[in-house]
Image (cartoon, grey):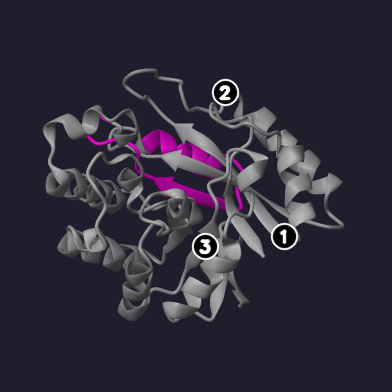
Amino acid sequence: MLDYHIHSTFSNDGEMTMEEACCQAVKLGLKEIAITDHMDIDLPENLEAYQIEDLNLYMEELVLVKDQFQNCLNVKAGIELGLQDWTLEKSVAIANDYPFDFVIASIHMVNGEDPYNRIYFNSRDKLKSYTDYYATILDVLKDYDDFNVLGHLDYLRRYSPYEYVSTDYKIGEEIIESILKLLIEKGKGLELNTAGFRHSSKQPHPHPDIIKWFKQLGGEIVAIGSDAHSIDYVGYEVDRAFDLLKYAGFNYVASFTNMQPSFVKI
């Protein structure tokens, strides 16, 4: 029972303290979590909107909850780096200057536009909205190595104004395949993000068949994360996520210490 994507009040949109997140995890019977607050550098609309204001204080707080819950919960020091092609050097420095156990590489921005703000879709139909997003992921990850898993591969689906159909996960298949192969080549993993279950699609990020495709291509590393921003969603649908991992052909889930994966049998 692991949850490797949790946001505390160190994230601008977080609604729970680290201690509250840990208490909820213990209550639910989770054995291990990673706190992974947002660090998006140089957002066009607000340069500090999703940044951890004080990384030293962040790490100090992580040490405190690690010690506080050491007898009942394994707490890992994580971060979610929001990458853009002009912020990679700064992201490298953050990933290497602090003792993280786990780093999520996430793409939230495409040419300065975040699908979250919906304006992204004003100039794009469904096909172009997906393919532009995937192309950005591919371009950015070609030049970045300091991470463990790619977060929420089809993040834009959460905010798309276009009606979801069951074959949407096939949009941009050629680019997706290139992303999966690049992750495997780099020895990196994929996140199974259960927040997608709350979307009208009722599917995680990414679709289970993409997780299965990752495995068929030779992928070995998958982490499960709820993307919780409040206690209501800590550990959200992790049991279901384990079932989908088995469907995809995985007999284990990844855990991380000092940026190195180990594997937990499921």
Please tell me whether residue 180 is drawn above or below residue 67 in the rendered image. below
Of tags 1 and 2, the one toward the viewer is 1
Callout 2 crowding tier (Cα within 10 Å): few <14, some 14–19, many ≥20? some
The residue that mark 2 highlights is 53
> Can you give x and y, in whole percent of width and height, for residue 217 in the image?
30, 77
For the residues labelled 1 and 3, the Cα–Cα distance comes to 14 Å
Mark 2 residue type: Glu
Q: Which residues are magenta?
A: 89-113
The residue that mark 1 highlights is 30
Q: In the rendered image, which quarter contains the C terminus? A: bottom right
Secondary element type, mark 2 = loop
For the residues labelled 1 and 2, the Cα–Cα distance comes to 29 Å
Side of 138 where 263 appears, left or right: right
Callout 3 crowding tier (Cα within 10 Å): few <14, some 14–19, many ≥20? many
For the residues labelled 3 and 2, the Cα–Cα distance comes to 26 Å
**Residue toward you, 70 or 195:** 195
Q: Residue at x 45, y 57 (%)?
A: 149
Tell whether position 250 is magenta.
no
Tell whether position 97 is magenta.
yes
Res. 258 image quadrant:
bottom right
The residue that mark 3 highlights is 223
Mark 1 residue type: Leu
Mark 1 vs mark 2: which is more N-terminal? 1
